[in-house]
Amino acid sequence: PEMQGGLVKTLDFKIYLGLLSETYNPAHAQDLARLEASKLDMVVTNLYPFSKTVAAPTATPEQARANIDIGGPCMLRAAAKNFLRVAALSDPVDYARILAELKQGDGSLTLNTRFELAQKAFAHTAAYDTAIAAYLAGRTASAVRQCYKIMN
């Protein structure tokens, strides 16, 4: 379930069980069954357009805050961490190549491909977090406070 406004829709423990489980580990397989969770073999996600949003001359701190993606980076990082089994697809440029490999590999990707995708996913989430940190570093609390009437 998600909160109003679409918050928390991908922050569900069953998603992370499915991404992080090591299905070759019998205890993990038992946990998946016991908790009625399914293994997930791939994450394909595009993050909220934070950099594009804050690049607009009229962007407000609230628009910036609203475009900080939480669930997308979490899923990418979980998938990338478990590259032994899970593919973390973070760049639309890769879609056609990955689809072709899936077709050629009978629905599977090689470890080399999953590792390459993990490298790319961690670089992507690091750049995303760096953009957020840079934006926040360029603001003062008093300037941000002016956007929020209820904050002191």
Image: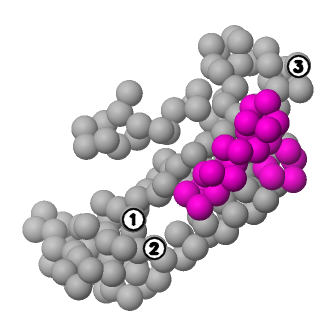
- Residue 44 falls left or right of residue 122: left
Which of these two is toward me, 62 or 105? 105
Q: Report which residue position mark 2 lands on.
A: 132
Q: Is residue 86 visible?
A: no
Q: Quick check: 103 above or below 152? A: above
Q: What amino acid is at disc 1? A: Pro
User: Which is more foreground, mark 2 or mark 1?
Assistant: 1
Estimate how packed mark 3 is, as few (under 14), some (14 to 19) or many (20 or more) residues with alpha carbons within 10 Å. few
Q: Residue at x 58, y 32 (%)?
A: 15
Counting from the top left corner in percent of width and height, residue 82 is at 77, 44
Magenta segment: 88-114
> What secondary structure is found at the residue carrying circle 2?
helix
Q: Residue at x 41, y 37 (%)?
A: 9
- Residue 74 falls left or right of residue 118: left
Mark 2 and mark 1 lie on one chain; the one further toward the N terminus is 1
Counting from the top left corner in percent of width and height, residue 60 is at 22, 75
Q: What amino acid is at disc 2? A: Ile
Q: What amino acid is at disc 3? A: Pro
Q: Report which residue position mark 3 lands on.
A: 26
Q: Report which residue position mark 1 lands on.
A: 49
Which of these two is toward me, 102 or 72? 102
On the rendered image, what quadrant is the C terminus found in? bottom left
